[in-house]
Image: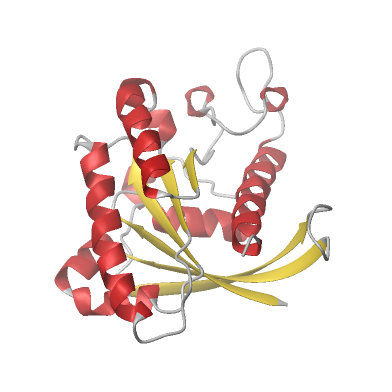
Amino acid sequence: MLEVKIAFVGGSDSGKSSLVKFLKICNYEVENQADKYSETWGISVNYLEWEHHNPNLPLKNYTIRFGLWESGGSFLKKFPFYNQYLLKNANLIVYMVSLASDENLLERLQNLVTQTREQWNKLKSQENIDKMREVVLLTKADLGYIYAQQQIQEIQGYCTQQGIEKCQILSIPYNERPDKRDTIVDDEMFDKEGDLVNPPLARHTLSSQFLDSISEICLKY
């Protein structure tokens, strides 16, 4: 079994805890998310086993045990010392930026990348680490995708320039509201009215796509 540590890095509004919970259970039934929101305080660690199949890789079938590490943005601002525990021995860094934010998204991502790389380079001198793998997730696409088109293009260009493996737009289908259409789930998952035909299957599909995507990145090296 391959052990993979993933460190999710982002502000307190980026959806880190929601994504981890979604990946764990492929189900998030919440009628009013705002009323249910609770920021992670401290560092949270969850584990998930995943069977990855890829005929283009030597072994074709891999069992991966993901360690999903994340922390509330406010906690790390108050206690930056704990960044080292979040990043130590991480196989993949996932930067998360909410498209629903009123801030300059590119500037927000640049600050995340700069601060994380500085901390990681300090750890690199203490450990046998060859390469930092990075992915960008632009979350809450259902709330800000239309209004952030130009900023999304700027971010995609920045990721290419910085050698970041992947820039992905993500909107977790928390519920079945028609306006919560996800940007990754195939059109065949929706009926003519735009409603999800099979919500559990759609959630499982989205979760599987994400886990397969990060599996391929981690297995490349």
Q: Residue furthest top?
A: 192
Left or right: residue 51 compared with residue 181: right
Q: Is residue 200 above or below residue 129?
A: above
Give percent across and percent down for residue 112.
Answer: 27, 55
**In the image, residue 56 lies at what x, y percent?**
80, 52
Residue at 38% x, 50% y: name it: 96
Q: Residue at x 32, y 58 (%)?
A: 38
Q: Nearer the viewer, residue 153 or 10?
A: 153
Image spot of residue 54 (x, y percent)? 79, 54
The quarter of the displayed image where residue 143 is located: top left
Where is residue 150? Give x, y as percent.
31, 23
Position of the C terminus by quadrant? bottom right
| Residue 173 is at least partly visible in this image | yes
Residue farthest to the bottom, as pictured: 126
Specify whether 80 is left or right of 206: left
Question: Which quadrant of the view contains residue 85?
Answer: bottom left
| Residue nearest the observer in this picture, 149 or 173 | 149
Write the residue at 33% across / 42% down. 98
Closer-to-camera residue (215/221): 221
Q: Residue at x 48, y 73 (%)?
A: 130
* Quadrant of the image containing the N terminus: bottom right
Q: Is residue 11 visible?
A: no
Q: Which residue is more in the foreground, 103 or 59?
A: 59
